[in-house]
Image: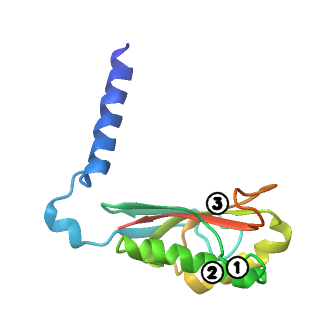
Amino acid sequence: MSRKNTNRRAFLAGTLAGIAGGTLTASAADDETKAKITGLFPKDAPAADLGYTPGILAEGRKLIFVSGRGPHDHAADMETQMRQTFESIGKVLEAAGASMKDIVNMRAYFVNITRDLPAFRKVRKEFLSKPYPSATAVGVTALAVPDLQIEIEAVAVL
């Protein structure tokens, strides 16, 4: 194995160990400090829509990865399904001591993106604030849960 690959592996192993142990370079006194989240708005890379930021610089100690969440009432109208999904994300974040304001990245999957993207864009502004998280919307043919039309995952930093 080359020295370059050994160094990369050592760096990755140390980084993962630090994340798993909850410490990277901050001291115990920093535990109570919230992340610093800064929106990145390069002049030549504007956001395609309001409600998300082209990039986020997040400086913090803890990462919260929220698995794909969906609504509990699959028969409800799409705005209601979106609200239920965001509320579910909020409950997971709350369990980690975080809130919707701590989200730095969001990915949404739609079975019918043309129909549902406008409702998503409307509802996300009810739950998120500036700087909005970086985000991606993806159209898919199906989701893992039968009858599910929307699934959203998120990453938050504390």
Q: Residue at x 63, y 80 (%)?
A: 84
Question: Going by the image, does 59 lie left or right of 73?
Answer: left
Q: Quadrant of residue 67?
A: bottom right
The image quadrant of residue 78 is bottom right
SS type, badge 1: loop
Q: Is residue 14 above or below residue 10?
A: below
Q: Look at mark 2 in the image and give the residue it sits on.
A: 84
Q: Can you tell which mark lies on residue 73?
A: 1
Q: What crowding class fits label 1: few (fewer than 14 Cα within 10 Å), some (14-19), or many (20 or more)?
A: some
Q: Is residue 19 above or below residue 152?
A: above
- Residue under label 3, please give it: 45
The answer to whether mark 3 and mark 1 are in CB contact below 8 A is no
Decide: few, some or many residues near mark 2? Use Cα within 10 Å; few <14, some 14-19, many ≥20: some
Q: Residue at x 62, y 83 (%)?
A: 125
Report, in whole angstroms, how far the alpha carbon at label 2 lies from the one at label 1: 8 Å
Element type where label 3 sits in the image: loop
Q: Amino acid at mark 1?
A: Asp
Q: Position of residue 1 (x, y in %)?
A: 38, 13
Amino acid residing under circle 3? Ala
Q: CA distance from mark 3 to mark 1?
A: 37 Å
**For mark 3, does the 10 Å Cα neighbourhood hold few (<14), some (14 to 19), or many (20 or more) residues?**
few
Residue lying farthest to the front in this orientation: 146
Foreground of the two, 69 or 139: 69
